[in-house]
Amino acid sequence: MEYKLVSSDSHINEPPDLWTRSAPSHLRDLVPHVVSVEQGDAWVVAPGVAPRPVSTSAAAGVKPEDYLKKAVTYAGMRPGSFEPKARLGDMDMDGVDAEVLYPGIARALDTFHDTEVRRYCAQAYNDWLAEFQSTDPARLVALAILPSLDDGDNAAEELRRAATLGVRGAFLSTPVGGRPLSHPAGESLWTAAEELGIPISLHIGAGKALMHKLADPADAHLPGVREAYISTVPMTINEHIATLIYGGVFERHPGLKMVIAESGIGWIPYYLERMEAVFDRHRHYLKSQLTRHPTEVFQKHMFATFQEDHAGLRLRDMLGVDTLMWASDYPHTDTTWPGSRGVVERYFAEVPPSDRRSILAENCTSLYGLTS
């Protein structure tokens, strides 16, 4: 098929019984499950952890002024969140040719109960999503979920297993206070990803911002705290970008590709400029592992996704057009669904056709091996 508009970052909402229906008996009470709360359906990701309402993860088609006005349940959310045929129908409504599928609650894999639970949940999710993708592999791109580097070689082992299922990318969980991505514990994963030609994704929320650092969790309800978190969380992924680049990960793995998802792009040119200054002034006494300029490394090895970003599009030459990928973020609160075509026309009005083709489709189809 001909790809004209591809979402490089869309999401599913895992079926409520995904992990309970086949869990071994000794894990059944430990795996994530859905309960009913005042706000609707909610996930309990581990024993003793407060339920997380599905709420804003199922906002497709809801007006922003109506977010959270009523309880959100699986029965009431769009079936395209978790049913592949319904998903294809929603894509048709939006004029989107293909989507890269990121997890829903499984983005919190690092908070699941323990190493064994995380490994089981990753395997069950990846099996299910590979089947989801099989409904139409030309339009649905499955990303495996992987345990963090803190779980030893589990990430590498699961990536190799998931690759046999046909996944075309992988999402890496990053726990609060976890090992830096340049840690030797990551070498088995980076080696596997490089050998398999599978890009690894970090998603918005991978860098832990204000809401994760409050001394008193009750302070989250103070005026402005949540708005500040939502406004700043895209940029908190910056530490991971710098750690990967300065830590020499791409020097050791020249075929490795990484995706920075849903963090926007307008702030990255300044950040790369700052990294250039650090490279020029500090690399000697810090005994830097980096032999190339940070911008060169970013442009060769990293990709960034965005929904609506005038600043980033105007600075696309500083980023490198080949690093940028548009996304719809269906079905979350930032989604452009069902009006993605109109959004694209508005934001890309002054972008030349060749750049439009690259950012809206070609960069993503090339990265994930989709062929026209």
Image (spheres, grey):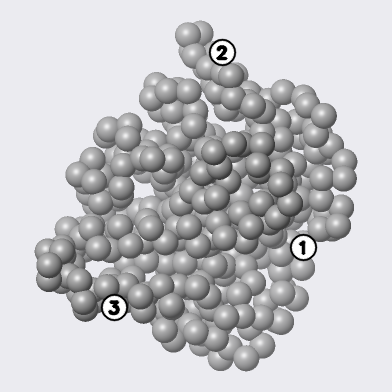
**Where residue 245 sits in the image (x, y, percent)?**
28, 63
Mark nearest the camera among 1 and 3 is 3
Question: In percent of the image, x 25 and y 51: which residue is there?
Answer: 182
Specify which label sits upstream in the sequence, 2 or 1.
Answer: 2
Relative to residue 181, is residue 3 drawn left or right? right
Per the model, the C-alpha gap separating discs 1 and 3 is 42 Å
Q: Camera-side residue: 118 or 99?
A: 118
Q: Split into 4 quadrants, where in the image is the N terminus? A: bottom right
Say which amino acid is labelled 3: Ala
Q: Does residue 238 appear in this view?
A: yes
Q: Position of residue 275 (x, y in %)?
A: 32, 72
| Residue 152, placed above or below residue 242 | above
Q: How many neighbours does mark 1 have within 10 angstroms: few (below 14), some (14-19), or many (20 or more)?
A: many
* Residue denoted by label 2: 29
Name the residue tied to disc 1.
338
The residue that appears at 61% across and 36% down in the rendered structure is 217
